[in-house]
């Protein structure tokens, strides 16, 4: 065997970019795309950064491309919404060094707020899309994307999905080959998108896509596999694997380039099979185009637009064979919950006590929406907590939001929350904003950000002070509070929500899962003192369970001694053993 390695899809994308000679990579974390950056940073030859959001990341990559080197931006599907402003226009500008945007979709919503399909945005932005089906293709297609980018003068999207990004497969390793940097040349008509220049570029983009669609008919990555022609399937991405497993004898047209589509190749394939199926997760993007050409095909009539596919699901839908071999077993639901010792639990127990509603945002703290906390009432997208609360105030007046706060994490605040806070200052808001600062991007697995003092490479860097940032906007009332000082937190929240002025409370305490976090100790139940009042259970710590007799037990493999339960117990029925290492 040559030089091979088993790699995650995301790791293989990073490898492909490395081999293609990429020099700059910028990203904002988001499941399932995060490991692309976490792997590319291991190659010393590549400059790799976490940017504060996806728009910035794409613009950094555009700058690097304009400077003549190959560059990449990566993000999850909703990140592309944030980056769509530069995307739509860099499509007109095109590239100097190859520019690749890797976007990871999440059919089945394993960790997302929606299930949007990147191919729809790519079509609207007139940007080509490559879609690999396994780790090796993830490497190869990423390299190819850089070649196409330069050949057709276009940014190229490599689209992956959770199943591909997070599955492993054998990858062939090749050497890194760096193209010579392209010397900078001023080109106003191409790079300055004022109306006069953009009109001409729009026509170019239409032409570019037509040319690419024509070439797509003979591209090797669009491949026909003729077998039994009674069934033909057009598919791409991870769905190809399901098709091969479910219908090993069927004829398949496997598309590597999913936008633009190879019309002639599809027409030819359709003419050779008796019954044509189009198997694509999420939206009927291929199907609608194929049907618009007058080709008869079966797609979303029998396949869902929601969630992931599987070979069993295809067998059932196409062959009517149900091979689900397990009886559906009643498994108790295990909804996601905040970890033991999570600082957000302390914040929410205070807000719950004060009967405060929260306009929520995206992060671990979104879990404040579920029982037993039930504090977070809204979640839209990153940064939206502050602006939606502002909208409520403008609709109904400041009295109406007296029992409301906006809650937003530190990473989310720096992502897009800060713009919304600027708006509150500018438009004279009287709301209370709580920045839940746990010193990390918790939800996506502890990535650093501009306020942590560490870069993606792990180097020391100045940490932006969120406190000073808020003060610099001219907000008079900005307070930092330790979330485990519950009395103080309660006082500050009461005081600031009552105040008829804008205020910001920065609720501080590091995420209990950070490597640097040393648990304070262990809590233990003292059953003889327990009055079975259940107060310790209210914040919903997973380390505490109620016994049949109404007393409680604390699982010392889960407890990290945050002490929240102890503070809630009026009968000293919870003891504490300090951590000798603290
Ligand atoms: C536009 C967009 N980009 C990325 C994500 C993925 N994501 C969800 S929450 C989050 C940040 C969470 O960090 P923070 O705000 O610090 O809250 P924590 O999870 O630490 O409580 C990220 C990156 C997303 N949902 N939307």
Image (tube, rainbow, N blue to C red):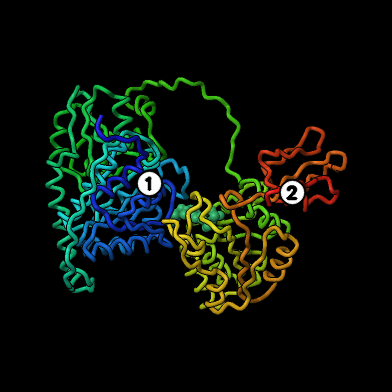
Q: Residue 339: x percent and y percent?
A: 61, 46
Q: Is residue 191 left or right of residue 81?
A: left
Q: Can residue 299 be seen by looking at this rendering?
A: no
Q: Is residue 223 left or right of residue 118?
A: left
Q: Which residue is mark 1?
A: 105
Q: Residues within 10 Å of mark 2 (few under 14, many from 20)?
A: few
Q: Tell me what residue is drawn at x 20 percent, y 50 percent.
A: 177
Q: Residue 395: x percent and y percent?
A: 56, 70
The reply to whether callout 1 and callout 2 are in contact (CB within 8 Å) is no
Q: Is residue 384 left or right of residue 348?
A: left
Q: Is residue 527 left or right of residue 294?
A: right
Q: Can residue 461 be seen by looking at this rendering?
A: yes
Callout 1: helix, strand or loop?
Answer: strand
Q: Residue 112: x percent and y percent?
A: 46, 48
Q: Residue 444: x percent and y percent?
A: 48, 50
Which of 501 and 169 lies nearest the eye of the viewer? 169
Q: How many marks?
A: 2
**Quadrant location of the N terminus?**
top left
Callout 2: helix, strand or loop?
Answer: strand
Q: Tell me what residue is drawn at x 35 percent, y 25 percent.
A: 315
In the rendered structure, find residue 578 and report the number of the disc placed on it. 2
In the rendered structure, find residue 122 and report the number of the disc placed on it. none
Q: Tell me what residue is drawn at x 50 percent, y 49 percent.
A: 445
Of the residues under marks 1 and 2, which one precedes in the sequence? 1
């Amino acid at each position: 065997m040559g030089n091979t390695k088993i790699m995650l899809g995301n790791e293989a994308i990073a490898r492909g970019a490395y081999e293609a000679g990429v020099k700059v990579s910028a990203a904002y974390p988001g499941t399932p795309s995060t490991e692309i950056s976490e792997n590319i940073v291991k190659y010393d030859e590549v400059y790799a950064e976490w940017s504060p959001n996806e728009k910035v990341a794409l613009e950094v990559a555009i700058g690097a491309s304009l400077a003549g080197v190959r560059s990449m931006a990566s993000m999850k599907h909703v990140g592309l919404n944030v980056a769509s402003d530069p995307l739509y226009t860099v499509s007109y500008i095109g590239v100097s060094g190859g520019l690749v945007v890797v976007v990871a979709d999440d059919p089945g919503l394993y960790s997302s707020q929606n299930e949007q399909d990147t191919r729809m945005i790519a079509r609207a932005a007139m940007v080509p899309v490559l879609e690999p089906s396994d780790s090796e293709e993830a490497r190869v297609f990423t390299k190819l994307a850089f070649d196409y980018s330069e050949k057709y003068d276009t940014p190229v999207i490599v689209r992956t999905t959770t199943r591909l990004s997070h599955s492993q497969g054998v990858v062939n390793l090749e050497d890194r080959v760096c193209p010579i940097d392209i010397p900078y040349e001023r080109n106003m008509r191409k790079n300055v998108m004022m109306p006069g220049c953009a009109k001409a570029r729009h026509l170019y983009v239409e032409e570019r896509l037509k040319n690419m669609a024509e070439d797509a008919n003979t591209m090797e990555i669009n491949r026909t596999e003729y077998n039994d022609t009674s069934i033909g399937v057009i598919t791409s991405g991870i769905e190809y694997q399901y098709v091969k497993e479910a219908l090993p004898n069927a004829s398949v047209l496997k598309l590597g380039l999913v936008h633009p589509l190879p019309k002639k190749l599809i027409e030819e394939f359709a003419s050779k099979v008796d019954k044509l199926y189009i198997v694509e997760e999420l939206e009927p993007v291929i199907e609608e185009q194929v049907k618009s050409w007058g080709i008869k095909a079966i797609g979303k009539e029998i396949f869902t637009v929601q969630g992931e596919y599987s070979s069993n699901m295809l067998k059932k839908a196409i062959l009517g064979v149900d091979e689900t071999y397990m009886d559906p077993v009643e498994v108790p639901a295990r909804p996601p919950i905040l970890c033991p010792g999570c600082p957000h639990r302390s914040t929410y127990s205070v807000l719950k006590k004060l009967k405060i509603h929260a306009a929520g945002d995206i992060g671990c703290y979104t879990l404040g929406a579920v029982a037993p906390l039930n504090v977070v009432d809204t979640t839209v997208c990153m940064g939206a907590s502050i602006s939606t609360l502002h909208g409520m105030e403008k609709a109904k007046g400041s009295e109406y939001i007296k029992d409301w706060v906006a809650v937003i994490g530190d990473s989310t605040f720096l992502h897009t929350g800060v713009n919304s806070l600027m708006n509150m200052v500018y438009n004279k808001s009287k709301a209370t904003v709580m920045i839940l600062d746990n010193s990390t991007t918790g939800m996506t697995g502890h990535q650093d950000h501009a306020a942590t003092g560490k870069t993606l490479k792990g180097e020391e860097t100045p940490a932006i002070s969120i406190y000073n940032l808020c003060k610099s906007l001219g907000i008079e009332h900005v307070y930092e509070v330790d979330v485990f000082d519950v009395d103080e937190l309660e006082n500050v929240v009461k005081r600031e929500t009552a105040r008829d002025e804008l205020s910001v409370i920065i609720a501080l305490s590091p995420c209990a899962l950070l490597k640097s976090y040393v648990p304070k100790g262990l809590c233990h139940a003292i059953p003889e003192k327990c009055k079975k009042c259940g107060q310790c259970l209210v914040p919903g710590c997973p380390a505490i369970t109620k016994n049949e007799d109404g007393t409680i037990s604390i699982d010392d493999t889960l407890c990290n001694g945050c002490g929240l339960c102890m503070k809630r117990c009026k009968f000293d029925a919870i003891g504490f053993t300090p951590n000798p290492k603290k």
